[in-house]
Image (tube, grey):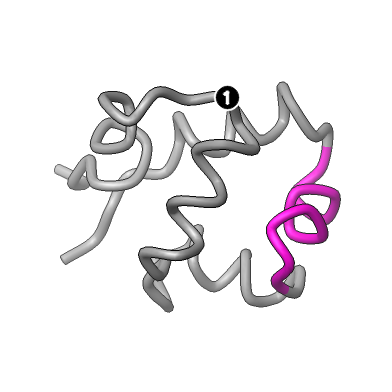
Amino acid sequence: MSFDYKKLKGRIKEYYDTQDNFAKALNIGRTGLSLRLNNRMDFTQKEINRAYVLLDLSKEEIPEYFFKQKV
């Protein structure tokens, strides 16, 4: 199953300017973030919990940023 991370990528750009800056804040490597955003690797629960705080999202917004399926 593939997820649509377009909205998440936009939020990362808005808050951190680059995916590299966000990866550092999330405490994962740039390559690791890229793998996750390209559906090659899954985000862990811990990463999602940290990311929604870093990106100033509400818990209710998590599904639309992390679990929206590609169609």
Q: Amino acid at mark 1?
A: Asp
For the N terminus, the image quarter is: bottom left
Judge left or right: residue 47 versus residue 27.
Answer: left
Q: Is residue 3 left or right of residue 23?
A: left
Does residue 16 appear left or right of residue 44 in this picture?
right
**Element marked by disc 1:** loop
Mark 1 Cα-neighbour bin, 10 Å: few <14, some 14–19, many ≥20? few
Q: Nearer the viewer, residue 44 or 8?
A: 44
Q: Residue 48 location in percent, x, y? A: 44, 53
Seen from the viewer's position, the closer of residues 24 and 10 is: 24
Percent across and percent down for residue 63 are 24, 37
Which residue is at 14% across, 43% downward?
Answer: 71
Name the spot of residue 2 as percent of width and height, x first: 24, 61
Asked where in the image residue 11 lies, by quadrant, the reply is: top right
Instruction: Point out residue 43 in the picture as x, y percentages from the top left corner.
Output: 42, 66
67 in relation to 11, above or below: below
Tell me the residue at 28%/53% (across/down): 3
The magenta stretch is: 18-28
* Residue 19: in magenta span: yes
Residue 12: which quarter of the image? top right
Most common SS among magenta residues: helix
Does 67 sit left or right of 21 as displayed? left
In the figure, 5 relative to 41: above or below?
Answer: above
Task: Please give the count of numbered marks on the rendered protein.
Answer: 1
**Which residue is under mark 1?**
56
